[in-house]
Amino acid sequence: IWLNMYRVGVIGMVMFGSVGELVLVWNMADLFMGLMSVLNLIAIFLLGNVAFDALKDYARQKSEGLDPTFNKRDIDLPYQERVECWNS
């Protein structure tokens, strides 16, 4: 359902962009770019610890002379049971 809502929103914005005033269209584009930037910064902040844990695990494996392999059990994840990648 979310994907269909997104598609309808995109079509609506394309239609609005084709008939709206140029200044308003650019201002709306700037607004939504800013919102995307804020959301990305929040995601980076929330996932930063996971990235640093993965980097520490990588550096540890490299210092041991191993070819780094990532497994979710090697990284302390608060939601480890929901991670679908890095399977053993």
Image: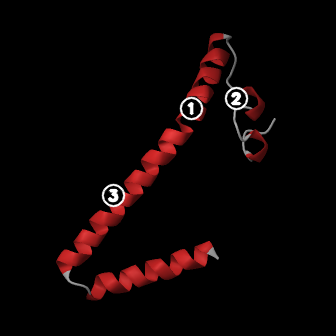
Front-lying residue, 75 or 63: 75
* Residue 40 left/right relative to 26: right
Q: Residue at x 60, y 34 (%)?
A: 50
At numbered mark 2, what does the secondary structure look like: helix, strand or loop?
Answer: loop
Which residue is farthest right?
88
Question: Which picture quadrant has residue 26?
Answer: bottom left
Q: Residues within 10 Å of mark 2 (few under 14, many from 20)?
A: some
Q: Amino acid at mark 1?
A: Asn
Whole-percent x, y for residue 87 in the image:
78, 39
Which residue is farthest left?
23
Whole-percent x, y for residue 59 in the image:
60, 18
Whole-percent x, y for residue 22 in the image:
19, 79
Residue pointed to by mark 1: 49
Q: Residue at x 75, y 39 (%)?
A: 80
* Residue 82 left/right relative to 51: right
Question: Which picture quadrant has residue 3?
Answer: bottom right
Which residue is farthest bottom?
19
Residues at circles 1 and 3 in contact by the CB criterion of under 8 Å: no
Q: CA distance from mark 1 to mark 3?
A: 24 Å
Q: Earlier in the sequence, mark 2 or mark 1?
A: 1
Q: Earlier in the sequence, mark 3 or mark 2?
A: 3
Q: Earlier in the sequence, mark 1 or mark 3?
A: 3
Q: Residues within 10 Å of mark 1 (few under 14, many from 20)?
A: few
Residue pointed to by mark 3: 34
Question: Which picture quadrant has residue 77?
Answer: top right
Q: CA distance from mark 3 to mark 2?
A: 32 Å
